[in-house]
Amino acid sequence: MDTEQLLASETLRHMVLDLRQMQTFIEDPLVITKADGVWYEDVHGRRIMDGLSGIFVVTVGHNNRRVIGAIKAQLDTIAFAPPLHATNPPAIELVRRLGEVTPGNLNTIKLLSGGSEATEAAMKLARQYHKQTGHPNKYKIIARYYGYHGATMGALSATGTRRRKTMFEPMLPGFLHVHPPTCFRCPYEKTYPACDVFCARTIEDMIQLEGSDTVAAVILEPIGNTGGVVTPPAEYLPAIRELCDRHNVLLIFDEIITGFGRTGQMFASHTFGVTPDILCMGKGMSSGYIPLAGIAFRDTMAEAFWGSDEDEVEFSHGHTYGGNPVAAAAGLACLAEIVERDLPARAREMGAYLRSRLESLAELGIVGEIRGKGLLVGIEFVKNTETREPFGPDVKFGVQVGKTALKKGLLTRFDPNWIAFAPPLIVNREHIDYMMDIFTDSVKETLKKVRG
Ligand SMILES: Cc1ncc(COP(=O)(O)O)c(C=O)c1O
């Protein structure tokens, strides 16, 4: 297809992009034709820096020859193995390697193809586990407002973001929500550290009020994307780990964004020093070269799923593409890149530099808070830094900045009040300078418009 055909609205109007108003999209469509390293190129030959790893995915960068080579070689060997009857060498090797890099004894792995599949599987595993260990009434799942766990009905029921779910209600029964640790705007109007992580303690209240014999699991993102890179204080996750243990409630970390080096360690679980019972992974697991996701859980939990065929205690769950050999080969190559090039260390170093550049914007008087770990960094904008008053809802400051930056050649994740950066972990200082120069200009231009 030539450029004119690719941009023809008669064709594009028959597409449905993720969470997008297509009527707006077709007015000025972005059609990307190539990518290399940290750069995209669109249909007009315009370069755009990938400040978001696509959507928190392309950890090892675009056009990584090792990952591409592994996929090609695997296609020549075996592209599909029967998932009900057999497994295959790359899947076996990937499970072994993942067991080495996951925290604690999360050595039992189920391979899947997408993040929503992973969170669904984790919650189903938790329910079946309790049924098979003498607690058949433990079925409720506690999640958090602003959390996002995927688009399918179970994952969506755990999701706590109104815009993504109300049009599909009613959600599944048994899903409850608590506030996340948004210290900058504490929903309980408390102040850290005097609050003694009250928000974590509300989870225990909920477990007790609901009856701990009815609660199966708590699911959360160690750092929440929606809400503006919500980063917990150091005591928060240890406090939740401890209360889950006391009430025999499983702790599920949704590390679909935070996994594979993003926060400066292999998993955010390492960054915060807390091991969940079940860890959900996706996105950076294959760097987007092919769909790949999974869950890792304790070997001691896995024991509840061992028995004879007649016992019917095997994990009663599966997807056609789980453990696909080509996906597993991509995952192995991607993991090798992350480990051998020590990309988590690079995320720490470059994340610190990105942060320092963002901090220098303080003089503009609109930086509320800079949050995140490693190369998952968010900035919240405010109208008034003293009072933390946000810009009015009609201003959509962050959206204006994000759209301006995109026009200038930088892709970010933007929201009315915040912007997130999550470039590929291969970025260098020059890339970050390029990103921050565009970002600074975009903030200044938006400020001019807003302040007049
Ligand atoms: C934290 C988190 N969990 C789950 C998902 C769902 O993953 P997928 O879109 O691959 O189904 C996402 C997707 O953005 C996510 O960010």
Image (cartoon, grey):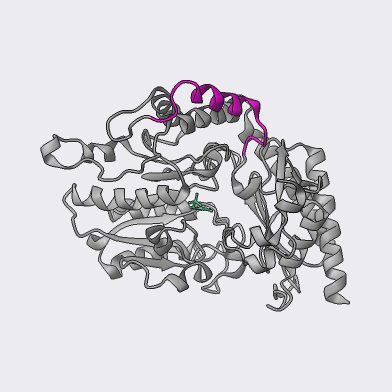
Residue at 28% x, 35% y is: 84
Spot the residue most to the left: 310
- In the image, 431: left or right of 297? right
Front residue of 23/2: it is 2
> Where residue 429 sits: x, y (%)?
79, 38
Asked if residue 352 is among those painted magenta in the image, a careful observer would answer: no
In this rendering, does residue 417 appear at all?
Answer: no
- In this picture, is 211 found above or below 110? below
| Location of residue 382 (image quadrant) | bottom right
Asked if residue 61 is among those painted magenta in the image, a careful observer would answer: yes
Tell me the quarter of the image containing the C terminus: bottom right
Front residue of 109/291: it is 291
> Where residue 319 sits: x, y (%)?
35, 43
| Location of residue 403 (image quadrant) | bottom right
Q: Which residues are magenta?
A: 59-80
Front residue of 403/290: it is 290
Tell me the quarter of the image containing the N terminus: top right
- In the image, 450: left or right of 194? right
> Where residue 89 sits: x, y (%)?
40, 22
